[in-house]
Amino acid sequence: MIDRAVTCVGEALAVLIPDEDATEYALTVGGAEANVACTLAALGIQARWVGRVGDDHFGRVILRTLAGHGVDVSDVEVDPRRQTGLYVKEIVDSRADTAGGSPSTVMRYYRAGSAACDMSPALADAAAVRDTPLLHFSGITAAISDSCAALASAFLDSPQPGRIVAFDVNFRPALWAGRDPAVLIDLARRADLVFIGADEAEAVCGVGDPDELRRLMPEPRTLVVKQGADGAVGFEAGQRVDVPALPVEIAEPTGAGDAFAAGFIAGTLRGLPLRDRLRLGTLAASCALRVRGDLGTMPDQAAIERFLATGELPDRVAELAPGAEINEIKAGAA
């Protein structure tokens, strides 16, 4: 295990996931940076999540769940006045209407005025953020409140020697209604490692082609363009590397981008070449795509090493039936 924790800063939410009949819901945990932290821990990287939760049942579930995944939550602030955010998944099975279609997800958010929305630039000076070897955050943090937007900028205002700042654009149109999301590209240009989906790039800046995106954002040391079923493209040190997506039957897509980022970051901390970092990202994403929760079960390190060396898919990935796991906590049990 890497002995210095990656720090992921952002919002974590309670999540309600419906069963197939949408008559009962499982309570679990979501949020981009929390998902990345959990997946990093599953990949053997010491991970810390920093954020704010309410002093309520959902906040306690988040802290207990992340700790159960091996994530350090000792720097999380519990707000006695504001509630913990929540979202509810509505899973639409488009396969019933479209040949070869995949399930899609409608997410209903209840986060206005949440504890996470009260994060401020002061958090950028916390030791857990300042002294980490790699800091990860996303565009969602920049979107949920003005003080959180100021925090996102503060992460990039004071570079720390030896620290890598990783930024996932994570464009969510509903969060930017009435505002210009171009700030996301400004944040990306100031980060060291950037993840962006070709589709969200097209929506934010009208550019989706990977080479054009690299010309638009030459500043990051590493730029990763995610292309869904077409795989991913990485740019670093003057080189372009393309890797295909892994074949997978999709149970539900939420969390796959976070898993990809975690896989790539794990490879970065282990000093893997760019191609293997991208491949580890696709492997982690394929695990998330096969489950209805945000977190898939990662293969063990030996299986990962075989995959990187030979391309052999771990049994866990090859055999897991879609929807077999939900990483759930029953709503009345916690």
Image (cartoon, rainbow, N blue to C red):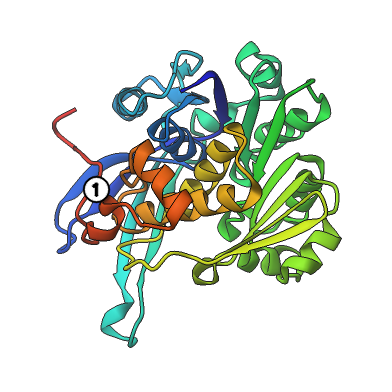
Give the percent coordinates (x, y) of residue 332.
14, 33
As displayed, is residue 263 above or below residue 311?
above
Q: Can residue 255 be seen by looking at this rendering?
A: no
As displayed, is residue 256 above or below residue 57?
below
Q: Would you say 14 lies left or right of 266 here?
A: left
> In front here: 202 or 256?
256
Number of residues whose C-alpha sits closer than 10 Å to that of mark 1, classed few (under 14), some (14–19) or many (20 or more)? some
Give the percent coordinates (x, y) of residue 199.
62, 68
Residue on which disc 1 sits = 326
Residue at 46% across / 47% down in the picture?
Answer: 259
Residue at 31% across / 49% down in the picture?
Answer: 293
Q: Can residue 90 be seen by looking at this rendering?
A: yes
> In front here: 275 or 105?
275
Which quadrant of the figure has residue 90? bottom left
Q: How many marks?
A: 1
Give the percent coordinates (x, y) of residue 208.
70, 70
Q: Quadrant of the C terminus?
A: top left
Residue at 34% across / 86% down in the picture?
Answer: 98
Residue at 22% across / 41% down in the picture?
Answer: 328
